[in-house]
Image (spheres, coloured by chain):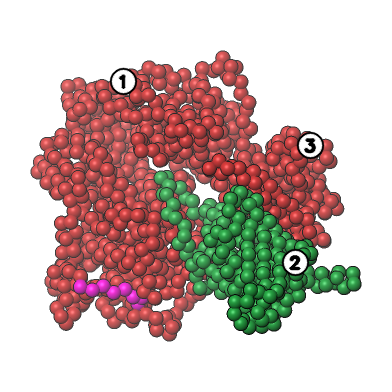
Amino acid sequence: MIDDTRRLNSFLRKTRRGHVLKITHELYLRTDITCGSNACQQCIIGQTTLLDKHMKNGNNLISTGHYLLVDTNIVLQQVDVLEDPLLTNVIVPQIVLDEVRHKSLAIYKRIRSIIAIPERKFFVFINEFNKNTFVLRKPGESPNDRNDRAIRKIAQFYNEHLKQQISIVLLTDDIANRDLARQEGLIAFSLKEYISTFNRPELLDRLVLKEESFDLEKDLGKRKEIIFPEHVSVSEVQRGIKSGKYLQGTFQASRENYLEANVFVQDSEKYNQLFVQGYRNLNRAVHDDIVAVEVLPEQEWAIPFSLVIDDKDDDQGDLVIEQEETGLVVQGVSSKRTSSCRIVAIIKRNWRQYCGILQESLPGARFHLFLPHERRIPKIRIESRQAEELKNSRVMVQIDHWPRSSRYPHGHFIKTLGKLGDKETENEVILAEHDILHHEFPEAVLDCLPKLPWTITEEDLANRVDLRDFCIVSIDPPGCTDIDDALHCRSLENGNFECGVHIADVTHFVRPNTALDLEARERGTTVYLTDRRIDMLPVLLSGNLCSLRGGEERFAFSVRWEITPDAKIVNTIFHKSIIKSRSAMTYEQAQAIKDDSGINDEIARSLRRLHSIAAQLRQKRLDKGALVLESSEVRFQLDTETHDPLNVINKELRETNWLVEEFMLLANISVAEKIYELFPDCACLRKHPAPPISNFDPLVKAAETKGFQVKANTGKELADSLDQAILSAHPYFNTMLRMLATRCMMQAVYFCSGFESDIKSFEHYGLATPIYTHFTSPIRRYADVLVHRLLAAGINADATFPDLLNKRVLQQICNNLNYRHRMAQYAARASVDLHTQLFFKNMNTNEDGYVFAVRKNALQILLPRYGLETTLFLRDKDGKSVGEFHEEESTQTINNLTIHMFDPVTVQISVDSNNIQRQRIQIHLVKPFIDGFSVAPIVKNKTTIDEIDNTITTPVKRLKVKSSK
Amino acid sequence: MSTPMDTSSLPIKNKSNQLTSTLTTDYIVGSDLISIEGYRQDGRKPNELRHFRVSFNVVPDADGSCYMEHGNCKLLATIYGPYEGESRSNQEQAIITCDFSMTSYCVSERRLRTFGDMKSQRLQMAIQRVFQQAIITETYPKSQIDIYLKILQSDGNDYSPCVNATTLAFINAGIPMKDFVCSSTVGYIQNKCIIDLNQQEEQQKSPQLTLTIMPQRDDIVALTCESRVHHDIYNEMLDAATRANLQLFDLMKQAVINQLKTVLHVL
């Protein structure tokens, strides 16, 4: 019910052209807003009531039942505490939500998700539209004071409304507000006061510490820590960006050197990427922040260090300063000054929750240092009362603020993930660090699934082409349960072939905008870890109803081509179908059938035909300049019980692998062309931009060391020069070049065609095709689901829905998919790393490898057998550099022995377990033998490691297993 | 489901940092015209009209007049006539003319030209046509009726309040009509139909529909929809607009009855 009272809100606003406008908004005050309490008899029945009639939570500050009322700062700063299930019956005023949203979307999202849980009993009270709680801003009153007053008004309202049956406890950390509330006779506490009465130390740990007012002078006298330059004010930054004095960009810390970073600049023609070096220039920026930077004058431009530096042993800031002032600023031989900048302000923090461990500190200390798992994040100082218990666990921590006088950001504890070194815990870390959604599917999602037993209805049959008699087979890796593609091939009367690709019809089950759809959209992709699979769709669909299992009737989306024997496509049709796969084969089985001339049944014949067409398609593609990029892909053979790695198997590539791949590419390309033709404005496509030519510099340089010229002006040129670069004496050389080439590539991304003005930019560089999309794996990728829907709507096979043609939504989804996709790749790599470590845990072996890159103080060693890339530091016992680095030739000379790139070496691998907190794979040089640096090869039975400190442990970088698909 | 095909929006410049998950956030925040609790920004629910107030006989010289406030929109409608028109031909029906103008201060940015622009002319034409249908013009052959509309303060769409005010002014003038003519707008935002858009809501690039009906005869007089709308939503929007018009009709009827009561009381 709208009350008669109507308020007019007038304010002045300046337009872009400098005009001043007076804008008036209406505000209707209502009398029908519920208080949400079950104890209330006045409010209109039938509206949601959440708050308990009798509320008890064991708090002894207030003996009676009470509701909590939070203010904006509590939500903004202490959302971690609010997330604890202990706190229930909380009133969240609308004005608080509005303010929170205005200040931080991330926290708004979190508080919204708490509100969404009915058990938590968080009630949103609409105070601004409520006649009883509306307060008008007094003349001269600041908006903040007005909002505080509004919140106190709510407490008063509830007190009167509920006739004192239940007290309202106002939680606020603002002392002035608390005092005012107490004067008005309300009960008010700070959050700390409130939760200290529960005996829960970990809850106290989660409290965000108030930013301590620090005395710069005093701090200076006391400690020799660095004082960061002050950040420039917001208005100054805005003015600076407008005038071109400052630039805005994304801050990306270096993985290798914690004193270096890059800023990717937006909207600048002059600079694309700027380099930042040194503590003061970095000025408290954390990885992923949006920052404002000022370009340094050219004479101050820095030289990126090829040193690999760990932020490990210097708890005192002094050492770093010293390093910064002496060691690090020493200019190298190089003349490659990079355009550099310094950070003047942080525009937006992109802090998230970080996994890591607590660094050991003195017993009884209150403050501890937290070592994040992600190397690009600085250590975080936290307060904890439970350091003893957390000693050997992985914990999660959030950064709160970073004062000028502190070397490290200050943060607070959130939760523990489990015991250190435990495989479950480590998996949990991988998932959390890569933002992978791995919760159980909620009820609402499971409700969208079809009920078992699932049957095919007459209606289904009427709408689909019946292909159950076709000889369709699927070929997949062994143990695959989510089979989303199947193939067939038969000869036609005119001598041509009809080939078909049949893709699981996921969109038949996943209807648009259902809970199931939204969940899959958010997950974006199935994530494959070494010992676990995190599904995008519930297992009933992914492993059963959608999976094209052998001998079962399944729905499919088919693409059929008429192809001449020399692989020219005559005709393409798309339709929904019903199929019955003859056999679900592994690559190995298919290969065997194809090669065995004794077998001549229908399956074998169609496999052979498919193979001959695929071979021609592949050749055509390669002729056009498609790249064959190398990556060493390994698989672990896992123990069936413990899932511990037992052995490493290099993935074998059979003909049948690329047979399937070739047809999938063809299907994807055909579908891409079709949906672009049907919906030029909102087709979901995938592009792989051509890398800028400068990206290939490392590759060209590396090839030159062996006397090869690599040209990379076009994809074709690159492919050809890679083909020619073969050393007969060094068979692995070509593979390594291709690996290097892979690293020069850009990331392939999904995009919405309506947002690209130029059709040329649709190109897929790696595959050398002008247009591409993903159609063939809807069970494990959401992009394919989108494409299925577009195609189905375009060929009138399925109903349309409003979002289908909304390109803004499509682009948003694409952005999310790109992010999820990338994170899934990183997680998969991290999982392999974890297993590699477990694999080497009790082993100490010699292994042959190659020098993959030469750094200033280290060699990157590639171990082909394990697909492993590790760093060999060239330091002796005292940490002094032993090698002599020649940048021009990229070589290192140690004791008159020069090591070049691609040189074969033998190394000894072991796991460094000295540091329980961070286990790492370490390697020692065995061959070529360098006196005082190398170690003797291990004799089989020898189990103890020689305690030689000259090789420092390093984290392991896994080679990217990137297929250009 | 969210906003359907919207072709009017320009391509948005790609953000260079696409590596953040924005999906849910955007879904929650995208346009916050309706809060999760179901309130619009001015405290209304999706199916509630703005504040509506009318007074009659504000211009005693005119044959009928009405001052109307609908939300922040304030306007004056005056009717002159029927009077003997310039005898152009032997017309059998009355001619209706409409003159629409705005004050220069009626919108937040001062207007220099207050009448005769494209927008005003189109609006004039539209209103003329609507009332040509609604008034029983055969009653007044060879005569002319003039409608003068003046917007004092504008709040988004001017057409609908003009139609409603003109109807009331005609009733005030005692000119026979077939029925009331009610007009209102409806928008489709965040998967919901919201009725009676104010300026803020109208500025969103979402589908909007303006429906003018004669509520008691169940006739559609005019219907405009300038955005592309999916047909499933279209019907939903039409229903919502009809309901809005019926609500409006009740208010207008009540206003007329009240006026009548006062007049009778005075008599």
Q: Nearer the viewer, mark 2 or mark 3?
A: 2
Chain A colour as displayed: red
Write down the chain letter for disc 3: A
State how far apart marks 3 and 1 are (Cα). 60 Å
Spot occupied by residue B262 in the image (x, y as percentages of width and height)? 86, 69
Write down the chain letter for disc 1: A
Left/right placement of residue A723 relative to residue A803 reads left
- Label 1: few (<14), some (14–19) or many (≥20) C-alpha neighbours in 10 Å: few
- The answer to whether any part of residue A467 appears in the image is yes
Q: Amino acid at mark 2?
A: Ala
Q: Residue at x 79, y 37 (%)?
A: A180
Q: Amino acid at mark 1?
A: Gln
- Callout 2: SS: loop
**Residue that numbered label 2 is attached to:** B62
**Residue that numbered label 3 is attached to:** A180
Query: Which label belongs to residue A331?
Result: 1
Chain B colour as displayed: green
Q: Which residues, given as a range, are shown in magenta? A: A570-577
Spot occupied by residue B128 in the image (x, y as percentages of width and height)? 61, 71
Spot occupied by residue B87 in the image (x, y as percentages of width and height)? 63, 76
Q: How many marks?
A: 3
State how far apart marks 1 and 2 are (Cα). 90 Å
Considering depth in this image, is B147 or A43 the residue closer to the camera?
B147
Q: Is residue A651 a member of the stretch shown in magenta?
A: no
Q: Residue at x 53, y 25 (%)?
A: A230
Q: Residue at x 75, y 66 (%)?
A: B62
> Is A177 above or below relative to B14?
above
